[in-house]
C-alpha cells in the first residue's frame, strides 16, 4: 500500500475526514428517516409518511415556479423516493469514503437545491425552524463544508477509496511490467 | 508468514484507514435503531361488538384514523346487524368509508388483515374471544371487566403471555387526564396522608333494562347462546352473561382504588338484591360491599338504582386531606382540620392533551358549595371522551413501540378478582377472602 502524496498534515487529514463523516451521517440519517416513514417515535407518536410535496409547494426564490410544479407532479412519490434514496447513498459515500468525490458533488448539488428552494431573505424567525437567518443558513454552510471536502482527496486519506485505488494499482503495475 | 511488529502496526493502520467511517456508521446506526423511530404505519384495527361501548371506542378510534394518525379501522363485527348499521353510520359522520362487516370475530380474523382487535362484547364472551384472537396472533384491547370469572381472566392473561401479544383491559379512568393529574399531584406525593377509608359510589335512579327491537321479527340469536333477543339486548341483567353492577360499574372504581392503595383487597363483605325492579331480571339493582385492604384500610362501594343524589364519585379520605373524584370530570381536594376546609384543584390541559394540577389555597369561593350541591352542575375539568381517545392511542403505541400499558392483565385481574368475589359474597351471605394471584 503506497502512502498518499499530500502536503496536508495528519491533523488536517483527520479534521477533513471527521467533517466528511459528520456530514455523511447527517445525509444518511435524513434519508433513512424519510424512507422509514410512516413510523412511530419512541414516545408513541405516529409519524406520517414523508413527502417533499409540502416543502416544494412552499418554496420561494428564483426557482419557485419549478419547485411548485414538482410539488404538484403526479410522480411526486417517485421523486420522494429519489430524494430519500439519494440522501442515503450520499451519506454512505461520505461516511465510508467510497467514491467520495462523486458523493461530495451530489451532496453539493442537493444542498444547493435545498438552499435555492428557500433562500432566507426575511431575516426573521421562521415557523418550526430554530435560529434566525439572513441569506446564510445551515444548508449553505453545510454546502460550503462539502465544497471544501470536494477539493481534497479525503477518501484517500481514510476510506474505502484507498481500497479501490489499491485494487486498481496492482493491475496497472502488472501491465506496466509486461510492457 | 512472518511480519515484523512494524509491518503488523502498518497493516492495522492501513486497515483502519480503509474502514474509516465504518465504526462511526456502526455506532450511530445502532443508536438510531435503539433510540430512533420504529417503522410502521397506523395500527390496523378490527372492532368486535359495536354496541354502546363498542361505538364509543369506535368514535375514539375514528379520531385517530386520519392520514398520519395512529389507527386504521379495517373491519367491524357484531352478531346484531342493527349495531353494525349504527356503527357504519357513526363512521360516516367522520367521513370514514364503511369498513368490511362480519357477524363473527372468526370470520373477521379469517378475511381481514388486521393486527389488533378492539372488543366490547357481553362479559361472558370476553375470554373465549380474547383468547381466540390472541392465539391468532392479534393484539387485544378488551373492554372491562376482564372476564366473567377468575379462571377466564387467567386464560386471557396466559394467552397474551404465550403469544407475546398486547392485552389491555379498557378502564377509562386509567387514561383520564384528571386521574393522571390526581396521581401525579396528590397520591404520589401522599398529600392526603394515610388513607384508611375510601368511599366508592355509583348511584342512579333508573331502570337498567334497555328497550329495543330485533333487526327483524324472526331474528334468532340462539346460535350465539342467547335464547331470545331480549337476552342479547339486556345481557347485563342475567347472570349467565353478566356480573351486574360490580362488573359494569364497581370494577372501574375498584381498579383505581387498587392503584391508589397499592394492592388488592384481602376480603370482602357484601349484600344486595333485586329490590326495586322485580321484572324477571337476575342482576341486583342494589349492591353494597366493604373491601378490606391490607393495613386496616377499607373501601366501601355502593351502587343503587333508586336514587341519583350521590351520583358517582370516588372519595379518598386520609389523615391530612380528602380527594373527591367526581363523574370522571372533576376533582375536589380538601385539607383536613386546619379550619380552611376547601382546597381547589386546577386542571389545565397541556399541549399533548394531558393535564397538570396545582393545589391552590386561593379558591375560597368554592367553600360555600357542598359537593352534593354541585353534583349535577359542577364544572368540567376534562372531556370524558378524551379518555377513550387516549385509550386507543396508547393501545396502538403499545403495539408499535412497546409503550407501557395503563391496565395490563395483572392489574385488570386484581380488580376483576375483587369484584367477582364481592358478587359471590352476596350469594354466600358471608365475608369472603379474596384469593391472591
Image (cartoon, helix red, strand yellow):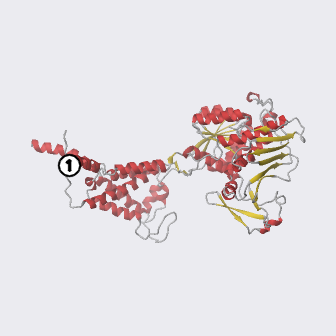
Between A46 and B177, the one nearer to me in the picture: B177
Between A9 and B212, the one nearer to me in the picture: A9
How crowded is the residue under tag 1: few (<14 C-alpha within 10 Å), some, or many (20+)?
few
The answer to whether residue B213 of the structure is visible from this angle is: no
Between B193 and B240, the one nearer to me in the picture: B193
- Decide if residue B314 is on the left or right side of residue A92: right
User: Dot 1: what SS?
Assistant: helix
Q: Residue A159 placed where, x, y %?
A: 29, 51
| Number of marks in picture | 1
- The chain ID associated with circle 1 is B
Q: Quadrant of residue B54?
A: top right
Between A26 and A118, the one nearer to me in the picture: A26
Considering only vertical position in the picture, is B298 above or below A19? above
The answer to whether residue B78 of the structure is visible from this angle is: yes
Considering only vertical position in the picture, is B183 above or below A135? above
Q: Residue A142 placed where, x, y %?
A: 37, 62
- Decide if residue B17 is on the left or right side of residue A75: left
Q: Quadrant of the N terminus of chain B?
A: top left
Q: Quadrant of the C terminus of chain B?
A: top right
Q: Quadrant of residue A67?
A: bottom left
From the image, tell me which residue sits under label 1: B6
Q: Residue B138 placed where, x, y %?
A: 60, 37
Q: Residue A54 placed where, x, y %?
A: 50, 57
Amino acid at each position: 500500500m503506497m502512502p498518499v502524496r499530500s502536503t496536508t498534515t495528519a491533523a488536517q487529514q483527520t479534521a477533513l475526514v471527521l467533517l466528511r463523516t459528520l456530514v455523511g451521517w447527517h445525509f444518511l440519517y435524513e434519508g433513512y428517516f424519510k424512507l422509514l416513514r410512516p413510523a412511530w417515535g419512541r414516545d408513541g407518536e405516529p409519524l406520517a409518511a414523508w413527502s417533499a410535496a409540502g416543502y416544494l409547494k412552499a418554496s420561494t426564490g428564483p426557482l419557485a415556479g419549478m419547485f411548485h410544479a414538482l410539488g404538484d407532479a403526479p410522480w411526486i412519490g417517485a421523486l420522494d423516493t429519489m430524494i430519500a434514496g439519494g440522501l442515503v447513498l450520499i451519506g454512505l459515500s461520505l461516511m465510508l469514503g467510497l467514491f467520495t468525490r462523486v458523493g461530495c458533488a451530489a451532496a453539493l448539488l442537493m444542498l444547493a437545491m435545498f438552499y435555492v428552494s428557500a433562500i432566507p431573505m426575511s431575516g426573521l424567525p421562521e415557523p418550526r425552524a430554530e435560529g434566525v437567518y439572513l441569506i446564510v443558513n445551515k444548508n449553505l454552510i453545510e454546502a460550503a463544508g462539502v465544497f471544501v471536502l470536494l477539493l481534497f482527496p479525503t477518501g484517500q486519506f481514510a476510506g474505502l477509496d484507498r481500497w479501490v485505488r489499491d485494487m486498481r494499482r496492482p493491475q496497472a503495475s502488472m501491465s506496466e511490467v509486461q510492457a | 508468514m512472518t511480519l515484523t511488529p512494524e509491518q503488523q502496526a502498518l497493516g492495522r493502520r492501513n486497515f483502519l484507514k480503509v474502514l474509516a467511517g465504518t465504526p462511526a456508521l456502526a455506532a450511530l446506526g445502532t443508536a438510531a435503531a435503539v433510540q430512533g423511530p420504529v417503522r410502521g404505519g397506523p395500527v390496523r384495527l378490527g372492532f368486535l361488538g359495536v354496541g354502546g361501548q363498542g361505538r364509543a371506542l369506535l368514535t375514539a378510534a375514528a379520531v385517530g384514523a386520519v392520514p398520519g394518525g395512529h389507527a386504521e379501522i379495517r373491519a367491524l363485527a357484531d352478531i346484531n346487524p342493527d349495531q353494525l348499521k349504527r356503527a357504519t353510520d357513526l363512521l360516516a359522520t367522520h367521513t370514514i368509508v364503511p369498513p368490511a362487516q362480519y357477524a363473527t370475530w372468526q370470520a373477521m380474523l379469517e378475511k381481514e388483515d388486521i393486527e389488533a382487535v378492539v372488543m366490547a362484547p357481553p362479559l361472558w364472551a370476553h375470554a373465549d374471544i380474547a383468547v381466540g384472537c390472541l392465539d391468532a396472533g392479534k393484539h387485544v384491547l378488551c373492554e372491562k371487566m376482564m372476564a366473567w370469572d377468575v379462571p377466564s381472566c387467567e386464560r386471557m392473561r396466559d394467552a397474551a403471555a404465550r403469544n407475546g401479544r398486547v392485552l389491555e383491559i379498557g378502564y377509562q379512568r386509567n387514561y383520564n387526564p384528571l386521574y393522571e393529574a390526581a396521581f401525579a399531584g396528590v397520591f404520589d406525593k401522599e398529600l392526603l396522608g394515610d388513607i384508611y377509608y375510601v368511599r366508592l359510589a355509583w348511584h342512579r335512579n333508573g331502570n337498567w333494562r334497555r328497550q329495543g327491537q330485533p333487526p327483524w321479527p324472526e331474528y334468532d340469536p340462539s346460535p350465539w347462546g342467547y335464547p331470545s333477543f331480549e337476552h342479547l339486548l339486556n345481557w347485563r341483567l342475567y347472570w349467565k352473561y353478566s356480573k351486574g353492577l360490580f362488573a359494569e360499574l364497581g370494577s372501574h372504581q375498584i381498579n383505581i382504588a387498587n392503584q391508589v392503595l397499592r394492592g388488592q383487597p384481602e376480603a370482602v363483605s357484601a349484600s344486595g338484591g333485586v329490590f326495586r325492579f322485580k321484572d324477571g331480571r337476575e342482576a341486583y339493582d342494589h349492591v353494597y360491599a366493604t373491601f378490606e385492604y391490607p393495613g386496616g384500610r377499607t373501601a366501601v362501594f355502593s351502587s343503587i338504582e333508586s336514587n341519583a343524589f350521590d351520583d358517582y364519585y370516588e372519595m379518598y379520605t386520609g389523615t391530612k386531606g380528602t380527594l373527591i373524584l367526581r363523574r370522571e370530570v372533576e376533582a375536589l381536594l380538601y385539607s383536613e382540620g386546619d379550619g380552611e376546609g376547601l382546597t381547589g384543584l386546577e386542571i389545565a390541559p397541556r399541549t399533548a392533551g394531558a393535564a397538570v394540577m396545582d393545589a391552590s389555597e386561593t379558591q375560597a369561593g368554592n367553600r360555600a358549595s357542598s359537593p352534593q350541591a354541585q353534583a349535577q352542575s359542577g364544572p368540567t375539568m376534562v372531556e370524558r371522551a378524551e379518555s377513550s381517545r387516549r385509550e386507543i392511542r396508547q393501545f396502538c403505541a403499545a403495539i408499535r413501540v412497546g409503550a407501557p400499558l395503563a391496565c395490563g392483565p395483572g392489574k385488570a385481574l386484581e380488580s376483576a378478582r375483587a369484584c367477582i368475589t364481592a358478587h359471590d359474597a352476596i350469594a354466600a351471605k358471608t365475608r369472603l377472602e379474596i384469593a391472591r394471584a
